Image (tube, grey):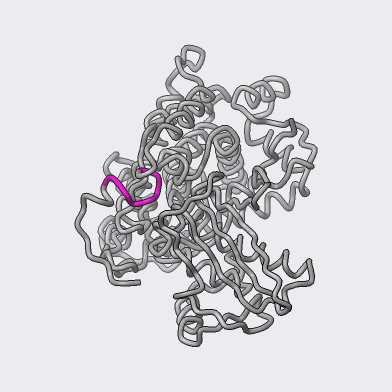
Amino acid sequence: MPHECISVFDIFKIGVGPSSSHTLGPWRAAMRFLDEMKTQGKLDDIRKLTVLLYGSLAKTGHGHGTDIAVLLGLSGDDPVTFDVNQIDPKIDGIRRNRQLHLHGDRFIDFDPVTDIAFLYEESLPYHPNALTFLVTLQNGEQLAATYYSIGGGFVVKEGENGGGSGSSVDLPFPIDTARQLLQWCIKTGFSISELVMENEHAWRSEAETKAGVMKIWEVMRDCIYRGCHTTGELPGGLKVGRRAAALNTRLLGGRTYNDYHSWVEAIRAGGQHFSYTLDWVSCFALAVNEENASFGRVVTAPTNGAAGVIPAVLQYYITFCDGLHEERILQFLLCASEIGSIFKKRATISAAMGGCQAEIGVSSAMAAAALTECLGGSQRQVLMAAEIAMEHHLGLTCDPIGGLVQVPCIERNTMGAIKAITASQLALQSNPELAKVSLDAVVKTMWDTALDMNSKYKETSDGGLAVNIPISLPEC
């Protein structure tokens, strides 16, 4: 059986919030659909287009911006480069004119109210996050294409499997499990990050990989800084106020800094005492996920809903552990990506499949592993840290209030970041040879738990906090 080949750039994707599975995935699915129609020579023949959203995409689609993402994707806009400040005016124009600038090439009549159908009671068997594009061509021919947003921005078409960079790549060190990863490390003497870099050579040069990973970090860094300096209320009608900026101001005693580096130096000058460090880790995580909730530019890590954990732990390492060096940042993100890929292959990184354990839990495990390697831990200690972090997220449900990626999602990123740091410290102070639970065992347990979990706790907003907190949201 061929190995699923997952690159660091499959795990870490630059995109737009608030959800990798409900926003970025459908956006990419719409772009892929149009590319396929263009390849078939049928793009210019489209007369009528309807989009069907199933299952979890329907139930929390409005709050997650699924309809907005589909409209932008069908317009030919790229989530990596599209100016997020233009989202509202663009969508307002489509709704007002009831026309879609298809692929940016030609206009067709399209009313989002009637041409995007939210099928709340229907779900397709392969995955809860499904969407179908129904097309009528000029000659009357009708076509349908179904895609699944399987978590972390990964998209597969009906009949496909995986969603990574492909099984055709010949990796020097194929890895599906933590045990295989450790075996390769022992055989080669490589650290996990070094092993990942060797595998990345199958796709591109080392220089290209390094440049791409540093670009990922730059987007994370800018997101943290922007979130720590932006006030106001999050969109969606839940009336959740931003907290990161106020916390940033309070921790810095009201002082302001106009660039990232002077800001970091000011934070570092505040000392290392526990409560101060804890507050900053929380601030970093809040900042990212408040940006995510505001349709800001973020990096899936491995998802948007959990996008704050890894940047927060990496920023902690940079600020309080002298980690502001390119080689250390590369090491951190490469190591983290491999842990994420194991969860993706052996379980899931989709909350619609596994609850929030599949998002915050996986991101916490990734961050714990990366921090442990960067702080000098052995390969076994790295895997132990990942196991500890996930072990204490098992069973975590996904129950977003109002279908918005705000409560409890934003605060959960602070918890995931703190657990990652704690797991790393425990692993560094432990003998991994004496560990009772392996990473592979906890991955399997997470997947078993996901299969047993009631669907109302899987990003449907049908249970948990979502039904026990009275709210009144404006009509969409």
Residue occupying image coordinates x 32% and y 49% = 462
Tell me: 197 left or right of 112.
right
Nearer-the-camera pick, 298 or 397: 397
Tell me: 234 left or right of 34.
left
Residue occupying image coordinates x 64% and y 30% = 176
Range covered by the magenta-colored residues: 457-464
| Residue ranking furthest to the bottom | 97
Nearer-the-camera pick, 376 or 28: 28
Q: Give the vertical position of 391 relative to 106 (above or below).
A: above
Residue occupying image coordinates x 53% and y 44% = 125
The magenta stretch spans residue 459: yes
Q: Position of residue 219 (x, y in %)?
A: 54, 59
The magenta stretch spans residue 14: no
Q: Tag count in the figure?
A: 0
Q: Give the vertical position of 301 relative to 298 (above or below).
A: above
Viewport quadrant of the C terminus: bottom left
Tell me: 406 left or right of 87.
left
Viewport quadrant of the N terminus: top right
Among the 4 quarters of the image, the one containing residue 327: top right
| Residue ranking furthest to the front | 140
Q: Position of residue 133 (x, y in %)?
A: 60, 64
Q: Position of residue 63 (x, y in %)?
A: 38, 62
Among the 4 quarters of the image, the one containing residue 345: top right
Residue occupying image coordinates x 55% and y 32% = 373
Q: Position of residue 26 (x, y in %)?
A: 55, 60
Q: Give the vertical position of 88 relative to 276 (above or below).
A: below
Among the 4 quarters of the image, the one containing residue 33: bottom right
Question: Magenta span: helix, strand or loop, mainly?
Answer: loop
| Residue ranking furthest to the left | 470
